[in-house]
Image (cartoon, rainbow, N blue to C red):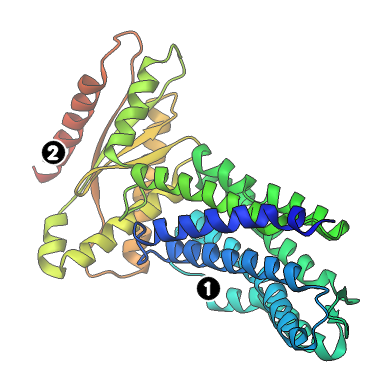
Amino acid sequence: MDLALRIDNNIVAIIVSIIFLIYISKRIDKTDPKIRVFFLMFLLNTIELITETLTCIINRQPYIWLIPITEFLHIILFILGPLITYLWFLFAYLWVSGNSKIQRSYNLILIFPMIINSLAVFASPFLYYVFSISANNIYQRGFLFFLPATIAYFYLLLSFSFIYINRDKTNRVEFFPLLLFAVFPVAGGIIQTLHYGFLLIWSTIAFSLIFIYLYLQQQMIQIDPLTGAWTRDTFYSFLNNRIGQNNSKNFAIVFIDMDNFKKINDTYGHLEGDKALMIVVQIINNILRKGDFIARYGGDEFVLYLNAESREEIEALMSRISQALDIHNKTKSPPYELVFSYGYELYNFDTRMNIDEYIKYVDELMYKSKKDKKI
């Protein structure tokens, strides 16, 4: 296959990737663990693209001094491959689970295949496990050439399975982009593995990462950066569309206001107050069902959207949330209690209340409940 035809796709992907790296390096919040993982994954994939392209350019160039360079480039190539797909799993895990890091024991198990791969790759210039470079500087596959690709596919499959199993923790907007991320890289990788000469896997990952970045930008607009709940604007837009639908299926909104939250901030500081809000959202998200969601309305006030058919169904769900908070208060022993007041109402399609009327009415019910607590 002509060299230009082999590497042209990679060249385009490298140029686009470098432009995107420069662009996003100034615009993303690198204090967020999952964003740091994403940026590192993008950076390493760009290095992988450059490395793969260089190996194609210098392969078969009959210069002895190029042999150690060729070996070094192939070591980088085969070590970075599984690492990039592992980082994708880590990114998916952090995004879906909402955790700031993965458990250490779990992580040690996960990186074990990469350790095995690295040992085989480092030994290849001497024992020809994964690859070998001939005296004429020609790359040849070793009998374990499939090992890096197999481990890379393992992480992609693990990511796919994790996202699918935890689909109830994501909304549809999140679920499908995350789930479909690996489809094109896997297809490209299979073609590249079976037909030597095609370069597809890392360029398809580059374009997939760009797609994910564009999705991330949209999500950062929709998601409250502190708690991970929907933003107020996103909630308004969704609810306005929902009310405008000619759909008789019932739904409700629930306004929640934290009790004595100002005291938490004043006594323990705003960082502790932020932590309390994050815990509340995490507990509520663990109980909400598919199709339900929580939005941060402002400060310590939240609003739930529930697909509910009756008041009894809403009461049962709110009771479960209250019990979960009570368990947290008893088992985690925080220096303060997480307690809230709430008000709710099923939307009545017969009255056709507009969004402002509906929100105001439910908000008043919540404040009435909060006032009744103090009597």
Image: 282 above or below 371: below
Which of the two discs, 2 and 1, labels the residue nearer the N terminus? 1
Q: Quadrant of residue 337?
A: bottom left
Q: Residue furthest bottom?
A: 126
Q: Nearer the viewer, residue 58 or 193?
A: 58
* 62 left or right, relative to 158: right
233 lies above or below 358 = below
Instruction: Say above or below: 244 vs 229.
Output: above
The residue at 15%/36% (across/down) is: 367
- What number is the disc on residue 103? 1
Q: Is residue 185 left or right of residue 196?
A: left
Residue 4: give its label.
Answer: none
What residue is disc 2 on? 372
Q: Position of residue 16 (x, y in %)?
A: 53, 53
**Residue 294 seen in this snapshot:** yes
**Residue 9 picture location, percent across and down:** 68, 52
Q: Look at label 1 and name its amino acid.
A: Gln
